[in-house]
Image: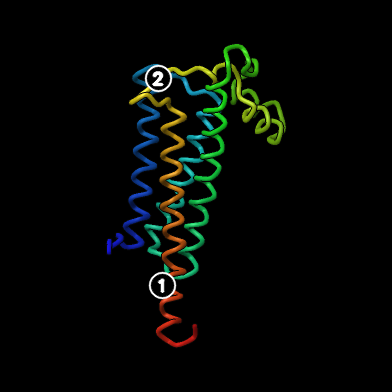
Amino acid sequence: MVKLPDIKACYLIGFFVSVSVFVGAIYLQVEMGLAPCPLCQLQRLFLLLVGLAFLLAALQDPKGLSIRIYGFLGLLFSGFGVLVAGRHLYLQFLPSGEAPSCVAGLDYLLNTLPIAEVIKMTLRGNDICAQVGWQFLGLSIPAWSLLFFVFLGLLSILQIWRIWSLRSASRIKKGVL
């Protein structure tokens, strides 16, 4: 049977993966000149939130209920990341000219519109989001983001599952189940 890393180590792995992906995104922006579209910016936000949840969990070294809370937060934020990256991929696979038209930058939208409208317009995407500007091993940036968010989500599920399986095992030993 495969021995899993301990709970704190799993949260540290998730944190370091989040930081590595975020640093990679900054590298693509600064060194390669790939300006992030609004959907890329949302993916970065969710990546930071997942990383923050994992970092806080690793620093606290949670027990019991707090393991599930941090696992749920990681799953929630990575789930939103999967949705945004999936929407981004959908836009990239649309036939040319069918992507929504260009919208103003995210900073302008945040300064002029209510947050609900900003989220709606950002998730709609635009023609810039539909462009494939960079690929690695045949996958675009949103495809890689999707894979990393799925990994982080699975890591979160592992943490949630682990605490439930430990509780069930202790109940079986006590004769409760």
- Residue type marked 2: Trp
Vertical order, 103 against 43 (above or below): above
- In this figure, which residue is indicated by the disc labeled 2? 134
Secondary structure under tag 2 reads loop
Q: Closer to the camera, 71 or 22?
A: 71
> How far across and down, in percent of the image, does residue 52 sit?
45, 48
Q: Quadrant of the N terminus?
A: bottom left
| Residue shown at the point (51%, 30%) measured from the top left | 41
Vertical order, 44 against 37 (above or below): below
> Which scheme is used to colour this image of the protein?
rainbow
Vertical order, 27 against 4 (above or below): above
Q: Is residue 19 left or right of residue 94?
A: left
Q: Please rate how many residues cluster around mark 2, counting C-alpha atoms within 10 Å: few if below 14, some from 14 to 19, many from 20.
A: few
| Residue 120 figure quarter | top right
Residue reaching furthest bottom?
175
Residue reaching furthest top?
97
Secondary structure under tag 1 reads helix
> How far across and down, in percent of the image, does residue 98 sit?
63, 16
Q: Earlier in the sequence, mark 2 or mark 1?
A: 2
Q: Closer to the camera, 10 or 94?
A: 94
Rendered image: mark on residue 58: none
Q: CA distance from mark 2 to mark 1?
A: 44 Å
- In this figure, which residue is indicated by the disc labeled 1? 166
Q: Is residue 23 left or right of residue 176?
A: left
Q: Closer to the camera, 59 or 166?
A: 166
